Amino acid sequence: MERKCFSEAKEHLSAMEPADIAEGLEELSSTQMVLYFRLLPKDLAIEVFEVMRWDEQQRLIEHVTDKEVGEIIEDMSDDDRTVLLDELPAKTVKKLLLQLSPEERQLANRLLNYTEGSAGRVMTPEFIDLKKGMTAEEAVGRIRSVARKKETIYTCFVIDDARHLQGVVELEDLIMAGSKTEVESIMDDEPVYVNTTTDQEEVARVMSRYDLHTIPVVDKENRLVGIVTFDDVLDILEEEATEDFERMAGIQPVEDSYLDVNILTMARKRFMWLVICIITEAFTSTVLKHYSQTIQTVVALTYFIPLLIGTGGNAGTQAATLMIRGMTVGDITRKDIGKILLRETASGLLLGGALAVLGFARAMVLDTGFDVAMVLTFAVVSVVLMGNLAGAILPLIARALKMDPAIMSGPFITTIVDVFGLIVYFEIARMVLKT
């Protein structure tokens, strides 16, 4: 490019993978990005655009002509285009929609009207449909004629004249069947499917459960309107995992990459939970003030406050992480609450007992006396047990209240266990030390 050997540069670019080109374009200035992008063959340019980060897509859109933008988004896969339009400002979306053909504009508007995070929002209507009365030879002929415009050819969907889903048939079965074999005889007439309103996280769980690479999406009248493919599910899983990770850390979900987020926006996303935590932790000060006489009588009790609140909070976070993971993959439901309480009680007593031995030894090393060491021993067991139970129950409560269980983790559980752990600690001290 520096030598202005554009033909040679175009040849090199055409041999590269779309994901590698997209990564390279992100390092260029806007002017250079447009110049490189215009060297790409149209089909490759569309593939590259689809795998670019949405903020880089927006940067490119702002520096190319309306005609070029229209050609790109016209031929994009419907699900990727929906993701792009969903991220862009409303004014930009309106401008882009005007560049589409009437058919594609109608389709884009229909997908955008589905609820955010639903199967309807992430599906693509580009699937291969067949009829039951077709022979295998006719079905393969249809696949060959429309394959280039479809999202996948490996799974085909059988519908009737009203577009009701009748079954699913794999390309492999069609190829292996006799040429005169009817599709009806080799299709799966009880296919797994989801509705347009199904949450995208549930779609991912269903596809994982049944080991599917494509799943049909039907409307409320059981008409086939689209499909979700495994590459869409990978994006969903990354998005959901990132969101859960941020919520578990007490951060409101951040859509942009770390370095692209405005520092004020990042601070605002983190501020709310920090405020909640500091208000809640204020109860810790109240607890300490309430037990000030006990603390003045046995100052050695203060040595182990950080140990207790740290241990209880960590135990709660561990339990919550296991619970949220189990709920996400479908291993745990509300009906399992009895088993969960028994398991967490048993593990809390086991872990608490083991840690209490270490706490007792530490107290004796500090020469706090046998009585204080025993207080610490009982308190460690109690706090770990409390943390385990809080970490197990709170995510279930969140799910019952239609909230994201990830909220009930990290700072939230740690703060709760801190407050109640101190109350338990000093109440044990009062009983054992008679203060």
Image: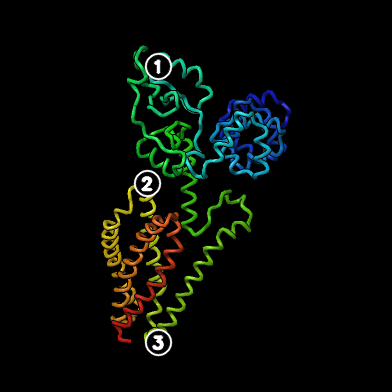
Percent of width and height locating residue 352: 30, 66
Q: Is mark 3 on a helix, strand or loop?
A: helix
Looking at the rendering, in which quadrant would you find the C terminus? Answer: bottom left
Looking at the rendering, in which quadrant would you find the N terminus? Answer: top right
Q: Which of labels 1 and 2 is toward the front?
A: 1
Between disc 1 and disc 2, whose residue precedes? 1
Number of residue marks: 3
In the picture of the structure, the residue carrying the numbered disc 3 is 293
What's the amino acid at mark 1? Met
Is the C-beta separation of discs 1 and 2 under 8 Å?
no
Image quadrant where residue 87 sits: top right
Percent of width and height locating residue 117: 50, 44
What's the amino acid at mark 2? Val
Between disc 3 and disc 1, whose residue precedes? 1
In the picture of the structure, the residue carrying the numbered disc 2 is 329
Q: How crowded is mark 1: few (under 14 residues within 10 Å), some or many (20 or more)?
A: some
Q: Residue at x 63, y 57 (%)?
A: 263
